Each structure stands twice: as C-alpha cells, then as structure tokens.
Amino acid sequence: MSAEVQLTEIAEVLRKARSIAVLTGAGISAESGIPTFREAQTGLWAQYRAEDLATPDAFVRRPELVWDWYEWRRERVRAAQPNPGHYALAELQRRAPACSLITQNVDGLHQRAGATMVLELHGNILRNKCFDEDCVVDAVLSAMRPPRCPHCGGMVRPDVVWFGEPLPEDVLQHAMRAAQSCDVFLSIGTAALVHPAAQLPMSAAENGATLIEINRDATPLSSMARYSVRALAGEYLPRLVQSAWPEEA
Ligand code: NAD
C-alpha cells in the first residue's frame, strides 16, 4: 500500500470513529526541541543517565544535583513551543465526537496547543510537590536548592513520576477506561516500553479497537498495530487531520 493510500485509509478510520484515545510519548515533543530520554543528554549533563537522576533515591542522596537537572530541563520546556503535531491533536479533539488525550510527557505542550482534559500519566515538570507530604506546593519562595515546603519544611521536588514510583491512580484509571472503551487508539512518538503506559494500546486492541501507531522508528507495538506508520509526528499529524476533515479546515 502506498503511503498516500494508507494516509487516506487512516483518515477515514478517524473520521468514522465514535471514540478515539490517543497516547503520546517524548517523540511528539522532539520536534519542539525537547530531547527524548533515549537521546544523549547534552553539555554538563552528558555524563549522567536520566535513569540515575529521576529516582527518589537519587534525590535523597544528591538533592541539589537532581534539583539543578530539573531546573535545566524546565528552562528548556519553558523556552519550547508546541509544534504542528500538538496543534493537530488539539484539532482532532475538536473534530472527533470523543477523544481522550493521554500523555507520558511532562512538558504541558499539549495544553499549550489547546488540548483539553489531558491525562498526564507522569505528572508535570512545571509543578512542584512536597517530597515528604506529597502535596502540591504552588509558590516556591526560598532560594534554596531544592527549596523547602512552606507547610512542613521538607524538601520540594518536581511533581513528576520517577522511576520506581507508582502512577497517579485516578489518572491511570481514567486512561484505562478510555483505552478500553475507544474504537480507535492512536499511539504516537512512544517507544511503548515503559509500563503501565505501554499496556494501554494493548488493552485497547484486546477490546477490539483499531490500533494505529505513528512513530519515527519501529517499536514492540508495530507488529500488533493495524496501521504502523514510520513518520515524524509534527509532519504527519497535520496532514492526517486535514485529510480526515478537509471541508472543515
Ligand atoms: P522514548 O524516548 O522511550 O521514545 C520516544 C519514541 O519517539 C521513540 O520510539 C522514537 O523513535 C520516537 N520519535 C522520536 N522523534 C519522533 C518524532 N519526531 N515523531 C514521531 N516519533 C518520534 O519516550 P517515551 O516512550 O515517552 O518514554 C520515555 C519516558 O520519558 C516517558 O515516561 C516520559 O515521561 C519521559 N520523557 C518526557 C519528555 C517530555 O515531557 N517531553 C521528554 C523526555 C522523556
């Protein structure tokens, strides 16, 4: 099947869908200049692996180092802009009768592109919480690295899910329900390796949904998907949504 015929077919599937669930990963933000974990860290941070910094143990052992790494990542997130892939998914949400957007990303770029009710499985890097009490801390006033919680004086940490930590239960439940009840599931820019997020597309397929993958490289999901497209999300998604709803663009 040629790429154009495939795009037309996928557009038709989307247009006819009653309920769509979308799962995005770091790949959708790559074209906004936010590197994926599997791509090398740069500059000062090149000597560290994300897996060695994004853990509760690392924070307890070297809080200043972990805080500084997150400050560096936050600067990149604040400077980044949503790309055409983020905007196309916000448009998809407006066009489809129902469309849940589930993301493993912590950068908030979907919301900045206009997406609504985004299910953030791994939290949000721009939010903070108390390490001891687990409650959100709105304003960080102290200049300490990391700052201290205004309620209990404990250390403040980014409100993201670290390696070895459970996902927020309510968000995961919502995401599971969306995956199990949709008739079309789109997996975009995710290596589909990190569980339980990687279970969502499988669960959707088991419940009869049409599984569509859009990813730069092949993944463990590729052979399971009804359509597996090798493409850059920021280039492919706008064409797909335009092709599904041409008269409304
Ligand atoms: P990943 O790094 O494991 O995989 C990214 C996938 O996207 C790869 O398969 C790659 O081939 C693909 N890809 C890269 N550029 C692409 C593009 N332009 N278009 C389409 N596909 C592209 O990311 P993951 O599966 O999301 O899992 C890693 C974890 O890292 C997640 O839990 C996430 O929370 C975290 N993370 C988030 C951000 C962010 O918020 N932007 C950035 C880095 C890591």
Image (cartoon, grey):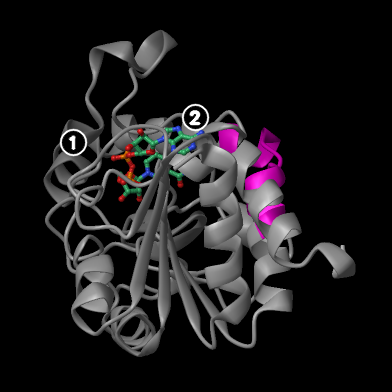
Mark 2 beta carbon near ligand 1 (under 8 Å): no
Q: Position of residue 60 (x, y in %)?
A: 17, 45
Front-lying residue, 112 or 128: 112
Task: State which quadrant residue 112 falls in.
Answer: bottom right
Mark 1 element type: helix
| Drawn side of residue 162 relative to residue 2, left or right | left
Q: Identify the residue under disc 1.
A: 51
Range shown magenta: 76-88
The residue sitting at 54% across, 60% down in the picture is: 9
| In the image, farthest residue toward the front | 1
- Amino acid identity at mark 2: Trp
- What distance separates the C-alpha of mark 2 from that of mark 1? 16 Å
Question: Quick check: can you spot residue 144?
Answer: no
Front-lying residue, 216 or 74: 216
- Amino acid identity at mark 1: Glu
The residue sitting at 18% across, 68% down in the picture is: 166
**Quarter of the render that holds ligand 1:** top left
Front-lying residue, 125 or 213: 213
Q: Identify the residue under disc 2.
A: 72
Q: Is residue 222 magenta?
A: no
| Drawn side of residue 172 relative to residue 248, left or right | left
Please rate how many residues cluster around mark 2, counting C-alpha atoms within 10 Å: few if below 14, some from 14 to 19, many from 20.
few
